[in-house]
Image (spheres, rainbow, N blue to C red):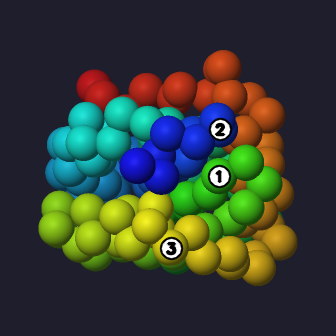
Amino acid sequence: MPETLSSPTLVACLCADWCRLCDSYRETFKTLEAQHPGCRFVWIDIEDEADLLGDLDIETFPTFLIGTEDQLHFVGPVMPQPGTAQRLLDSVLLHRPVVQEPLAQALLMYLQQRQCSTSLPHSR
């Protein structure tokens, strides 16, 4: 499977604590994490971790950032249905497209470097 590369694929969910949709999406994100043990899943509250995002503008929740090592594969909003997120992740893992988005790329690189300490809590 593509998930077993030397560097795990990072799947970050960018949400906000005040967003009720994000609250309900936590379970879907946990399910994705359980289904993809070769990936590293990170939940990021964009207000609590605003310094991480810099000028990256998140307008819709939930937003995923997916990348492997220094390759950004996807950044954008995800429909909050479990099947949609699953299909998106499966497609990205299979095809590994390369996305050019400098601000999201910078966030990916930062999260990859903070690998051991970035397991931000995604449960309450």
Q: Is residue 20 left or right of residue 56?
A: left
In this view, 74 is above or below 28: below
Q: Check disc 1 and report the residue beneath it.
A: 68
Q: Is residue 28 left or right of residue 103?
A: left
N-terminal label among 1 and 2: 2
Q: Residue 93: image x %, image y %? A: 46, 61
Q: Is residue 58 left or right of residue 25?
A: right
Q: Amino acid at mark 1?
A: Thr
Q: Residue at x 58, y 42 (%)?
A: 5
Q: How many labels were placed on the picture?
A: 3
Q: Is residue 21 visible?
A: yes
Q: Amino acid at mark 2?
A: Ser
In this view, 33 is above or below 47: above
Of helix, strand and loop, which one carries label 3? helix
Of helix, strand and loop, which one carries label 2? loop
Tag 1 near tag 2, CB within 8 Å: yes
In this view, 97 is above or below 62: below
Q: Residue at x 73, y 48 (%)?
A: 69
Q: Check disc 3 and report the residue beneath it.
A: 95
How far is mark 3 from mark 1, CA to CA?
12 Å
Q: Residues within 10 Å of mark 3 (few under 14, many from 20)?
A: few
Q: Is residue 42 visible?
A: no
Q: Residue 88: image x %, image y %? A: 35, 71
Q: Check disc 2 and report the residue beneath it.
A: 7
How far is mark 1 from mark 2, CA to CA?
7 Å
Q: What is the number of the mark on residue 106?
A: none
Q: Nearer the viewer, residue 8 or 85?
A: 8
In this view, 108 is above or below 38: below
Q: Residues within 10 Å of mark 1 (few under 14, many from 20)?
A: many
N-terminal label among 3 and 1: 1
